[in-house]
Image (cartoon, rainbow, N blue to C red):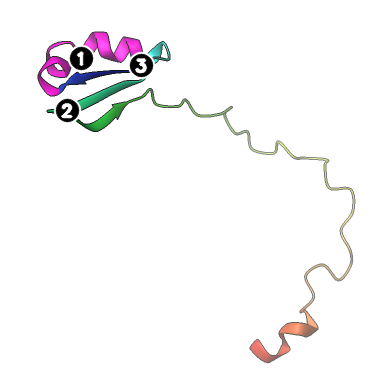
Amino acid sequence: MHQVNIHEAKTHLSRLIQEALEGEEVVIARGNQPVARLVPVRRGGPERRIGGAKGLVRSIADDFDAPLDDFSDYQ
């Protein structure tokens, strides 16, 4: 981790971004007080695909969508 002041962060933003991408923690401070941390944005996981779970559910009970007795007071 290394700390830079706001002026240095504005002047060397590209270099600081590259350091963050390489795993270095960069803290931006006003005076001597840390106010922000520069970290890379996490990339999303694998792209979702429609129908990706097809074939995983083998059977569904006949009463799957039947009303539950415990909730009769709420109906």
Q: Position of residue 9 (x, y in %)?
A: 17, 18
Give coordinates of residue 73: x percent, y percent: 68, 91
Amino acid type indicated by mark 2: Asn
Chain-order first, disc 1 or disc 2: 1
Kind of residue indicated by mark 1: Leu
Callout count = 3
Res. 70 mark: none
Residue at disc 2, secondary structure: loop
Q: What residue is rendered at 14% in x and 15% in y? A: 8
* Residue 55 position (above or below residue 32): below
- Indicate left or right for 23 with 63 as reference: left
Residue 63 lies left or right of residue 67; in this view the side is right
Determine whether 55 is above or below 59 in the image: above
Which circle marks residue 32 in the picture?
2
Which contiguous range is marked in magenta?
6-20
Residue named by callout 1: 13
Instruction: Return the x and y of residue 25 as percentages of the image width and height.
Output: 36, 20
- Residue carrying label 3: 20
Marks 3 and 1, how far apart in space?
A: 10 Å
Tag 3: residue type? Ala
**Residue closest to the eye, 45 or 10:** 10
Q: In this orientation, which residue lies closer to the viewer: 70 or 64?
A: 70
Cβ–Cβ below 8 Å for labels 3 and 2? Answer: no
